Amino acid sequence: MNLNSKYRLYYIVIYFIVISICQNVHLLNAQQIQVNRIEQMPNKPSPYEMRDWKSATMGYDSLVYNFDITGEFLPLIWWGGNGVNYPDEQTFGLHTVVGTTVPASSEAINVLPSLIGATLVGVDKSGQNGVNWIRKSREFFNKRPEENVYLNHPVTQSGSDWWYDTMPNVFFYQLYDLYDGIDEYDNQFISVAEQWLTAVKKMGGSTAPWTRPNMDYRGWYLSTMTPNASGVRQPEAAGAIA
Protein backbone atom coordinates (compact mmCIF):
# COMPACT_ATOMS: atom_id res chain seq x y z
CA MET A 1 0.00 0.00 0.00
CA ASN A 2 1.50 3.33 -1.01
CA LEU A 3 1.58 6.45 1.13
CA ASN A 4 -1.38 8.14 -0.62
CA SER A 5 -3.66 5.13 -0.23
CA LYS A 6 -2.67 4.88 3.43
CA TYR A 7 -3.59 8.55 3.89
CA ARG A 8 -7.05 7.84 2.51
CA LEU A 9 -7.46 4.93 4.91
CA TYR A 10 -6.44 7.08 7.85
CA TYR A 11 -8.84 9.84 6.85
CA ILE A 12 -11.65 7.27 6.95
CA VAL A 13 -10.59 6.13 10.41
CA ILE A 14 -10.30 9.72 11.67
CA TYR A 15 -13.79 10.49 10.33
CA PHE A 16 -15.06 7.33 12.01
CA ILE A 17 -13.64 8.25 15.42
CA VAL A 18 -14.68 11.91 15.28
CA ILE A 19 -18.26 10.92 14.40
CA SER A 20 -18.18 8.54 17.35
CA ILE A 21 -17.13 11.37 19.66
CA CYS A 22 -19.79 13.71 18.29
CA GLN A 23 -22.50 11.10 18.75
CA ASN A 24 -21.49 10.58 22.37
CA VAL A 25 -21.51 14.34 23.00
CA HIS A 26 -24.97 14.60 21.45
CA LEU A 27 -26.24 11.84 23.72
CA LEU A 28 -24.93 13.68 26.76
CA ASN A 29 -26.70 16.86 25.60
CA ALA A 30 -24.23 18.94 27.60
CA GLN A 31 -25.04 22.61 28.16
CA GLN A 32 -22.95 25.49 29.45
CA ILE A 33 -23.94 26.41 33.00
CA GLN A 34 -23.92 30.10 33.87
CA VAL A 35 -22.10 31.04 37.06
CA ASN A 36 -23.31 34.43 38.31
CA ARG A 37 -19.97 35.54 39.73
CA ILE A 38 -18.18 34.59 36.50
CA GLU A 39 -20.75 36.47 34.42
CA GLN A 40 -19.82 39.67 36.30
CA MET A 41 -16.24 39.43 35.05
CA PRO A 42 -15.39 41.31 31.84
CA ASN A 43 -14.52 39.23 28.80
CA LYS A 44 -11.62 41.60 28.13
CA PRO A 45 -10.14 42.98 31.37
CA SER A 46 -8.81 46.52 31.38
CA PRO A 47 -6.00 47.30 31.81
CA TYR A 48 -4.60 44.16 30.20
CA GLU A 49 -1.19 43.33 28.83
CA MET A 50 -0.44 40.14 26.91
CA ARG A 51 2.85 38.52 27.80
CA ASP A 52 5.41 38.39 24.98
CA TRP A 53 5.14 34.66 24.47
CA LYS A 54 7.66 34.58 21.63
CA SER A 55 10.35 36.06 23.88
CA ALA A 56 9.32 33.75 26.71
CA THR A 57 9.60 30.72 24.43
CA MET A 58 13.01 31.74 23.09
CA GLY A 59 14.19 32.42 26.63
CA TYR A 60 13.01 29.00 27.74
CA ASP A 61 14.84 27.34 24.83
CA SER A 62 18.08 29.16 25.60
CA LEU A 63 17.76 28.14 29.26
CA VAL A 64 16.94 24.44 29.03
CA TYR A 65 19.27 23.71 26.09
CA ASN A 66 22.27 25.31 27.80
CA PHE A 67 24.91 22.82 29.01
CA ASP A 68 27.15 25.58 30.39
CA ILE A 69 24.68 27.31 32.72
CA THR A 70 25.56 26.97 36.40
CA GLY A 71 23.57 27.19 39.61
CA GLU A 72 21.51 25.01 41.90
CA PHE A 73 19.84 22.19 39.93
CA LEU A 74 21.46 23.44 36.69
CA PRO A 75 21.92 22.59 33.89
CA LEU A 76 18.52 21.14 33.03
CA ILE A 77 19.85 19.15 30.07
CA TRP A 78 22.18 16.16 30.00
CA TRP A 79 23.97 13.97 27.49
CA GLY A 80 23.43 10.23 27.61
CA GLY A 81 25.08 7.33 25.87
CA ASN A 82 24.07 5.70 22.62
CA GLY A 83 20.38 5.11 22.14
CA VAL A 84 18.47 1.86 22.50
CA ASN A 85 16.14 2.43 19.58
CA TYR A 86 18.75 4.27 17.51
CA PRO A 87 22.15 2.98 18.72
CA ASP A 88 24.12 5.18 16.32
CA GLU A 89 22.72 8.35 17.88
CA GLN A 90 23.88 9.90 21.15
CA THR A 91 20.95 10.56 23.46
CA PHE A 92 20.05 13.59 25.54
CA GLY A 93 17.43 14.41 28.13
CA LEU A 94 15.72 17.30 29.88
CA HIS A 95 14.73 17.35 33.53
CA THR A 96 10.97 17.28 33.74
CA VAL A 97 11.07 18.81 37.23
CA VAL A 98 13.69 21.25 38.52
CA GLY A 99 15.53 19.50 41.34
CA THR A 100 14.37 16.08 40.19
CA THR A 101 15.41 13.02 42.19
CA VAL A 102 15.81 11.07 38.93
CA PRO A 103 18.23 13.27 36.95
CA ALA A 104 18.92 10.57 34.34
CA SER A 105 15.24 10.33 33.40
CA SER A 106 13.62 12.25 30.57
CA GLU A 107 10.05 12.36 29.27
CA ALA A 108 8.76 12.72 25.73
CA ILE A 109 5.92 14.94 26.96
CA ASN A 110 8.60 17.44 28.00
CA VAL A 111 11.25 17.05 25.30
CA LEU A 112 9.05 16.96 22.20
CA PRO A 113 6.98 20.08 23.08
CA SER A 114 10.21 21.97 23.79
CA LEU A 115 11.28 21.26 20.21
CA ILE A 116 7.90 22.25 18.80
CA GLY A 117 7.67 25.50 20.76
CA ALA A 118 11.15 26.64 19.77
CA THR A 119 10.48 25.78 16.13
CA LEU A 120 7.25 27.77 16.08
CA VAL A 121 9.11 30.93 17.12
CA GLY A 122 11.81 30.49 14.48
CA VAL A 123 14.50 28.31 16.06
CA ASP A 124 15.76 25.55 13.76
CA LYS A 125 16.16 22.65 16.16
CA SER A 126 17.51 20.42 13.40
CA GLY A 127 20.79 22.36 13.39
CA GLN A 128 20.95 24.45 16.54
CA ASN A 129 24.55 24.88 17.69
CA GLY A 130 25.57 22.10 15.34
CA VAL A 131 23.19 19.57 16.90
CA ASN A 132 20.19 17.96 15.22
CA TRP A 133 17.90 17.70 18.23
CA ILE A 134 15.04 16.48 16.05
CA ARG A 135 16.96 13.38 14.94
CA LYS A 136 17.98 12.67 18.53
CA SER A 137 14.38 12.89 19.75
CA ARG A 138 13.54 9.83 17.61
CA GLU A 139 14.83 7.79 20.56
CA PHE A 140 11.34 8.08 22.12
CA PHE A 141 9.99 5.93 19.27
CA ASN A 142 9.89 2.54 20.96
CA LYS A 143 11.31 0.51 18.10
CA ARG A 144 9.97 -2.87 19.14
CA PRO A 145 7.43 -4.85 17.10
CA GLU A 146 4.87 -4.91 19.92
CA GLU A 147 4.97 -1.11 20.39
CA ASN A 148 6.30 0.82 17.35
CA VAL A 149 4.88 4.15 18.51
CA TYR A 150 6.23 7.11 20.45
CA LEU A 151 5.97 6.61 24.20
CA ASN A 152 6.95 8.72 27.20
CA HIS A 153 10.30 6.95 27.67
CA PRO A 154 12.63 5.24 25.19
CA VAL A 155 12.11 1.83 26.78
CA THR A 156 8.65 1.42 28.27
CA GLN A 157 5.29 -0.24 27.69
CA SER A 158 2.01 1.26 26.59
CA GLY A 159 -1.18 0.66 28.54
CA SER A 160 -0.77 2.36 31.91
CA ASP A 161 -2.50 5.59 30.87
CA TRP A 162 -4.00 6.89 27.60
CA TRP A 163 -2.49 10.35 28.10
CA TYR A 164 1.12 9.19 28.34
CA ASP A 165 0.68 6.91 25.33
CA THR A 166 -1.19 9.21 22.95
CA MET A 167 0.38 12.63 23.61
CA PRO A 168 3.94 11.73 22.55
CA ASN A 169 2.47 10.66 19.20
CA VAL A 170 0.45 13.86 18.85
CA PHE A 171 3.66 15.82 19.48
CA PHE A 172 5.56 13.67 16.99
CA TYR A 173 2.96 14.39 14.31
CA GLN A 174 3.53 18.10 14.91
CA LEU A 175 7.28 17.61 14.46
CA TYR A 176 6.65 15.53 11.34
CA ASP A 177 4.72 18.48 9.92
CA LEU A 178 7.46 20.96 10.86
CA TYR A 179 10.53 19.05 9.65
CA ASP A 180 11.08 17.37 6.30
CA GLY A 181 13.73 14.80 5.55
CA ILE A 182 14.34 13.43 9.04
CA ASP A 183 15.47 9.80 8.71
CA GLU A 184 12.66 7.30 9.29
CA TYR A 185 10.03 9.98 9.99
CA ASP A 186 7.89 8.68 7.10
CA ASN A 187 8.07 5.14 8.45
CA GLN A 188 7.29 6.28 11.98
CA PHE A 189 4.33 8.31 10.73
CA ILE A 190 2.82 5.23 9.11
CA SER A 191 3.70 2.91 12.00
CA VAL A 192 1.97 5.12 14.58
CA ALA A 193 -1.20 5.31 12.48
CA GLU A 194 -1.23 1.58 11.77
CA GLN A 195 -0.76 0.65 15.43
CA TRP A 196 -3.62 2.82 16.61
CA LEU A 197 -5.80 1.72 13.69
CA THR A 198 -5.25 -1.89 14.75
CA ALA A 199 -6.12 -0.92 18.32
CA VAL A 200 -9.35 0.79 17.21
CA LYS A 201 -10.37 -2.37 15.38
CA LYS A 202 -9.56 -4.48 18.46
CA MET A 203 -11.78 -2.13 20.47
CA GLY A 204 -14.66 -3.15 18.23
CA GLY A 205 -14.49 -0.35 15.67
CA SER A 206 -15.54 -1.24 12.16
CA THR A 207 -16.63 0.55 8.99
CA ALA A 208 -18.44 -2.45 7.49
CA PRO A 209 -20.67 -2.94 9.37
CA TRP A 210 -20.51 0.47 11.05
CA THR A 211 -19.58 -0.13 14.69
CA ARG A 212 -18.21 2.33 17.21
CA PRO A 213 -15.18 1.23 19.24
CA ASN A 214 -15.40 0.96 23.02
CA MET A 215 -12.74 3.30 24.42
CA ASP A 216 -14.02 3.42 28.00
CA TYR A 217 -10.69 2.32 29.46
CA ARG A 218 -7.74 3.70 31.42
CA GLY A 219 -5.35 2.74 28.64
CA TRP A 220 -4.56 0.23 25.95
CA TYR A 221 -1.75 -2.32 25.85
CA LEU A 222 -0.46 -2.23 22.29
CA SER A 223 1.79 -5.22 22.99
CA THR A 224 -1.22 -7.50 23.54
CA MET A 225 -3.94 -5.32 21.97
CA THR A 226 -5.95 -5.56 25.18
CA PRO A 227 -7.51 -2.86 27.40
CA ASN A 228 -6.53 -1.58 30.82
CA ALA A 229 -9.88 -1.19 32.56
CA SER A 230 -8.50 -0.38 36.03
CA GLY A 231 -8.54 3.02 37.72
CA VAL A 232 -9.95 6.17 36.16
CA ARG A 233 -11.29 5.58 32.67
CA GLN A 234 -10.58 8.16 29.98
CA PRO A 235 -12.71 7.56 26.86
CA GLU A 236 -11.90 11.10 25.67
CA ALA A 237 -8.63 9.61 24.43
CA ALA A 238 -10.61 8.95 21.26
CA GLY A 239 -9.87 12.54 20.28
CA ALA A 240 -6.11 12.06 20.58
CA ILE A 241 -6.25 8.81 18.61
CA ALA A 242 -8.20 10.56 15.85
Image (tube, helix red, strand yellow):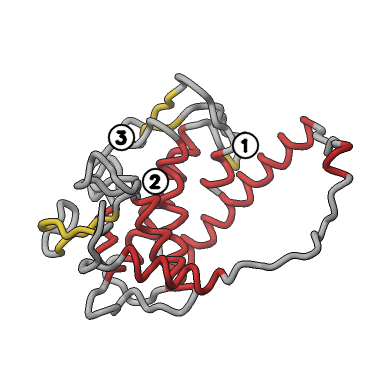
Q: Earlier in the sequence, mark 1 or mark 3?
A: 1
Residue 239 drawn at (x, y percent): 58, 45
Task: Describe the element under mark 3 as helix, strand or loop.
Answer: loop
Residue 85 drawn at (x, y percent): 19, 53
Q: Residue furthest top?
A: 230
Residue 34 at least partly seen: no
Q: Determine the image quadrant of residue 105.
A: top left
* Identity, as a three-letter code, of the amino acid under mark 1: Pro
Give the Cα separation between the discs numbered 2 and 3: 10 Å
Residue 223: assigned label: 3
Q: Which residue is mark 2?
A: 195
* Identity, as a three-letter code, of the amino acid under mark 3: Ser
Label 3: few (<14), some (14–19) or many (≥20) C-alpha neighbours in 10 Å:
some
Q: Nearer the viewer, residue 193 or 229?
A: 229
Q: Nearer the viewer, mark 2 or mark 1?
A: 2
Label 2: few (<14), some (14–19) or many (≥20) C-alpha neighbours in 10 Å:
some
Q: Determine the image quadrant of residue 152.
A: top left
Could you tell whether 238 is left or right of 22 in the image?
A: left
* Quadrant of the frame with the N terminus: bottom left
Q: Earlier in the sequence, mark 2 or mark 3?
A: 2
Task: Describe the element under mark 1 as helix, strand or loop.
Answer: loop
- The structure residue drawn at horizontal position 43% and vertical position 26%, both measured from the top left corner, is 227
Q: Nearer the viewer, mark 1 or mark 3?
A: 3
Could you tell whether 238 is left or right of 34 in the image?
A: left
Residue 209: assigned label: 1
